[in-house]
Amino acid sequence: MVKLKIGDTPRRVEDIRFLTGAGCYVDDMQLDDMAHAVVLRSPHAHADIRSIDTAAAIGGSGVVSILTGKDLAGHDIGPLHPYEQVNIYSNEPFCFPTQFPLAKDRVRYVGEPIALVIAETLEQALDAAEQIDVRYSPLPAKTRIQDALNGGDASDICLNWSVGDQQETDTAFQSAAHITQLAFRNHRVVTNPMEPRGGIGEYDIGTGRYKLHISAQSIHMARDRVAQTLGVEATMLRLIAPDVGGGFGVKNFMYPEMVLLCWAARVAGRPVKWINTRSDGFVSDHQARDNDAQAELALDAYGNFLALRVRSIGNLGAYLTGSMARIFTEQFVKLPGGPYRIPAIRVDVSAVYTNTVPTGVTRGPGFGEFANIMERLVDAAAREMGRDSTELRKQNLVSINEMPFMNAIGAIMDSGDFASNVEVAMKRARNGFEFRQSASEAKGKIRGIGIGYHIKATFGAPDENIKLSFEIDDTVTFTTGTQAIGQGHETSFRQIISDLLGIPAENIHYRAGDTDLIRNGGGHGSSRATFMAGTAIHMASERIQAKGKRIAAMMLEAAETDILFQDGAFSIAGTDRSVGLMAVAAKARAEGDLLDTLQNFTREHHTFPNGCHVAEVEIDPETGLVTLSRYTAVDDYGTMINPFLVAGQVHGAIAQGVGQALMEHGAYHADSGQLLTGSFMDYCMPRADDLPAFDLSFQGIPCTTNPLGVKGSGEAGAIAGFPAVANAILDALNSYNISCLDGPATSETIWRLLNKRQVSLP
């Protein structure tokens, strides 16, 4: 019987299930009389649909039904809905194109669903899909941000939004002794979790209620939006997420297939399964990043930052999805100056539509884009002013003595020692660097080192619900609205409960991923789960202890004020008389007054995880090959529930940040709108041998805005990795007078830069 404490490092309890093949993912599920579905997708980026002929397909062997856009109205299927009312974030009218689960008259990106084939087997559904005859009238496609801006069509602009004092910022720039200007292209990436998206729809004709088994991150939000599209109350739809094989943001929002599966189950009168293929995932899963920016940093003669100006334009793809209106506005500009003391900031943001796969979120949305801007600006300013970039950073970082600190946008950072993180990280990273640099030169190679400082605010859904239930067998069931997708929640939440209530970890059962278990939940995203659900657990434990003291006082025949709670037992102060928590729970159950507690937590403040990451690269000038040779990180995640799990999160996020910096790129043909990197043959992702052993250390300063002191650790490397690697490359290339780099830094890109050849990203 092991009682765990916050800060312990037990191994993940869920791993035994996964490593022995006992996990249950959507594709593992086989329901009675289950049919299979295939989505027919558009091969054109922009075209009018002239006709869809399903006659040959519907007569195919095993075909149950075929649904197209013309069937939507007859079944009361409406359009898809974003998660926020976007007009509250826009300073002027916005454009919000209507997206239906199946395209009706026009397709707007390669991969847009146009028909759903339901058959007895997957093979029969695939055969039938090939028999559908769709006639198109192709239209010109716009794939790049500039295409949308210059096209003259107002409907291509989703929103224009700004924040910050324009006059104050302009005045600061007028007084500046030095201004650094850079242009940025934060290229598009395709997020690839190990498990593809998929689901199984069910429909109960007797009750009219839907059930959807789905691989998703935020099932309560998805439930509400899917129900809205189906035209039913949210209570008429139950979403269940079994084991989920990764998400990284791509499974956070609603997708057309969620609606299609429910609709298909109703039409077929039986369960219907659909599992996305990896190829279809490349053209149907929400992609991410894709942002252009112009930025300026104003400094005085002593190197003090005076002001920051940013003009940022984001590519939404063909439709507005999920929370992207908020992410492109409020979240993008929460911390534009990162951890630095910048008195005046002005940010102007636009978001445009193109004929590409809709963009959503991936690790560190918004914060990754602005970290790249700010960290690149600092390094460029240091080079231009003849300053050491580390010292320039330390001079302008918000100090620990200034906490809590309100930035020029109004965000209040509660805690952190940014300068110490930089100092410790650089001391570790630079140890022996000159020797390694000389060794590289002896081999005809060049070596550089670069910093990427990350800081983010934990966004995501603003509230969370949990329930603690005391069972008759002396166990506790923990139910939450935020389900795990690989982070280790079953382990970390057990630790929190075991510590706060003194319950052996093996007696705590975890339940999540079912909208019928708990009425609302925020799901997973923006490193919010431990902060939000953990705080709710803390609040619930306080209520349980308070109620338990009243019952224990009666059981021990003592005054309630004399009752203490410690290590799972209530005792009378100054005596050895005590009663265990489970005995108190049994007494409460017998009296009809359960200790079971349903707890909601609504945040009033964000947390601000932060840290300094340092990359070291070696470049072969003959081939342009960039090798990441060392990577150092010093991070502040506040109180760490389980440092072992935190390290795992940091490792994975660094891999994603490095992947974007060096190889990952969702590239489109400028004219046809075809995705040029539509498979792992063309879309390169980092492998283990692309990465060095990471040197990680933690300097946690507890967050002051939640009782656990946690900050969230899921996105650090994805935010800091890109600028750290980019700055390291530019440091190595400094002797070649190269100061501009648009990622990914592939061998071809670097070779062209070194040989003064034009570099153009598709």
Image: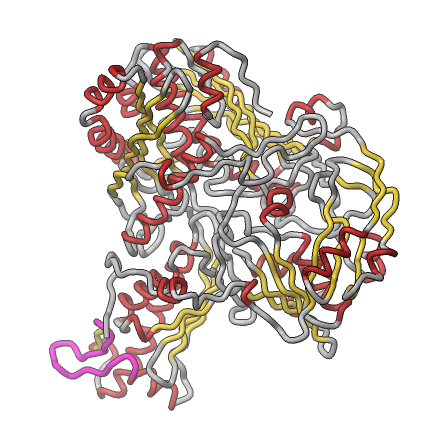
Q: Residue at x 44, y 30 (%)?
A: 661
Q: Quadrant of the C terminus?
A: top right
Q: Nearer the viewer, residue 510 or 178?
A: 510
Q: Where 567 sits versus 280, above or below?
A: below
In magenta stretch: residue 580: yes
Image position, residue 595 (x, y; %): 38, 79
Is 415 situated left or right of 666 in this image?
Answer: left
Asked if the magenta segment contains residue 696, the reply would be: no
Q: Is residue 7 above or below residue 447?
A: below
Residue 89 visible: yes
| Residue 228 seen anywhere in this rendered image of the structure | no
Q: Which residue does the image show at 55% across and 58% down from the upper left? A: 215
What colour scheme has been applied to the protein in the rendered image? secondary structure
Image location (x, y in percent) of residue 71:
83, 57
On the image, the x and y values in percent for residue 650 come to 35, 44
On the picture, is 46 further left or further right than 533? right
> What range of the chain is rendered magenta?
567-582
Q: Position of residue 253 (x, y in %)?
A: 59, 51
